[in-house]
Amino acid sequence: MKNLSISKTELPLETFAGDDVPITAESGLDSVFALVQGEFAALNSLIPRHLTSDVELVAEISRYIVESGGKRLRPLMTLLSTQALGFRANSNAEHQDSNHVALAAIIEFLHTATLLHDDVVDRSALRRGRMTANELWGNAPSVLVGDFLYSRAFQLMVDLGDLDIMRVLSNATNTIAEGEVMQLSHVGNCNLSETDYRKIISCKTALLFEAATHSGALLAHRQSKVEPQHTEAMRRFGLHFGIAYQLIDDYLDYVGNTAELGKQVGDDLAEGKLTLPIIHALRTASASDIRVVTEAIDSRSSEHFTDVIRVVKESGALDHTRNAAVEEINLALACLEPIPSSPYKSAMQHVTHFSANRIC
C-alpha cells in the first residue's frame, strides 16, 4: 500500500497527555473519545434539549434518527479541531455547551438531516443496522423532519453569533444539496468519469467533514488568534479525510458485510449508483465483463452482485479504490503536520489511521 506508513497491526504508539494508555489498534477510538469525554457528555445532553417540538411526531422521528448509534465522527472532528488550535472550554458549567459543543451539535443536526433526505431519495430500508425513518414512518414525515433538523441547526448557528461560521456552514449545506442532485442525475450513467465522481463525493460526503474542521478552526480563532495557514490546514484536512472516508466505504461495499456497513451490501448497485470500483471496472474490464456490470446497473437489482464482485476484483478496481483512499489519507495526515503538537492533534491523526485500517 503505497506511501502509507501504517499497517493493520502497526499504529502509532502515541500517548495522549495525561493518559497512560497507548493508542494501539486494539484500543480503537476509545482513547480518542475519552479525550473529549466531558464535551461528548455535554453534546449528548444538548442534542435532546433541541429536539423538542410541540408536534410529537417531529420529536419522535428526530430522536430515533439522532440516537441511532452512529459514530458521530463529524462532531468529534469539530471538538478535536477547535481544541487542537487552542480553544479551551469555559470552566463555568452553565456555558459548557455555548460554543464548541453547540457547534458540534449543529454539525450533527446537519448530518442527520442529510441522512433522512438521502434515505428517502435512495428508498433505503436500513441505516446503521436499523430500519430507516422512511421505512417506519413514510417518506413525507422523514423529509419534513429533515427540514426541521436543518432549521434547528440554523437556529443554533444564530445563537452562536459568528457570521464566518454561518457562512461556511450555509455554503456547505447548499453545496451538499447540489451534490445530491448531481449524484441523482448520474444514476445509471455508465459513462460517469472518475473526475466527475470525485466531484460528487467532494460535495456530497466530504464537504461536511470539511465544514466541521473549518468551522472548528474559526471558532478557535474567536478565542485566540489562529494562524491563517492553520485554519486552511484544518479545512483541507477535513476535505481529504472526507473523500477518503467515502472511498473506503466504496471499497468495503465490495468486500464488507451488512453488519459492518450498517446497510445492505450491494445497495449502491441496486440503486444504479456508480461508485469508484464500478467506474474503474467499466474502464478496464473485458468487453464481456463490462456487459455483466452494465446489465446489473440497468436492472437496478443486486441479483447479479456476485458476478459484479468478480468483475470488480479481476479488473483491479478494488486495488485502485484502495490506493485512491490511501492517497487521500496521506494528504489528510500531511495537512496536520504544521498544526502544533497536542493531544487533540494526536487524536485527529489516530482517527485518520483508524479509518485507513478499515481497508488494510
Image (cartoon, grey):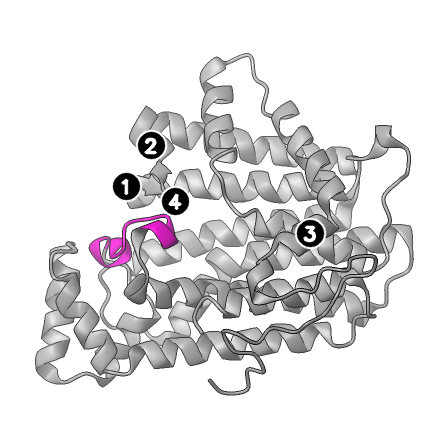
Q: Are marks 2 and 1 in contact (CB under 8 Å)?
A: yes
Task: Say which mark, if any, is on residue 78.
Answer: 3
Crowd rating for badge 3 (residues with CA inside 10 Å; few <14, some 14–19, many 20+): many
Residue 134 occupies quadrant: top left
Q: Residue at x 44, y 28 (%)?
A: 144
Mark 4 = which residue? 118
Q: Residues within 10 Å of mark 1 (few under 14, many from 20)?
A: some
Disc 4 residue type?
A: Asp
Quick one: label 2 or label 1, which is nearer the N terminus? 1
Spatial CA distance of label 2 from label 1 is 8 Å
Q: Is residue 185 left or right of residue 43?
A: left
The vertical placement of 137 against 26, above or below, is above
* Amino acid residing under circle 3: Thr
Seen at 38% across and 76% down, the residue is: 321
Amino acid at circle 2: Asn
Q: CA distance from mark 1 to mark 4?
A: 8 Å
The residue tagged 1 is 123
Magenta range is: 259-271
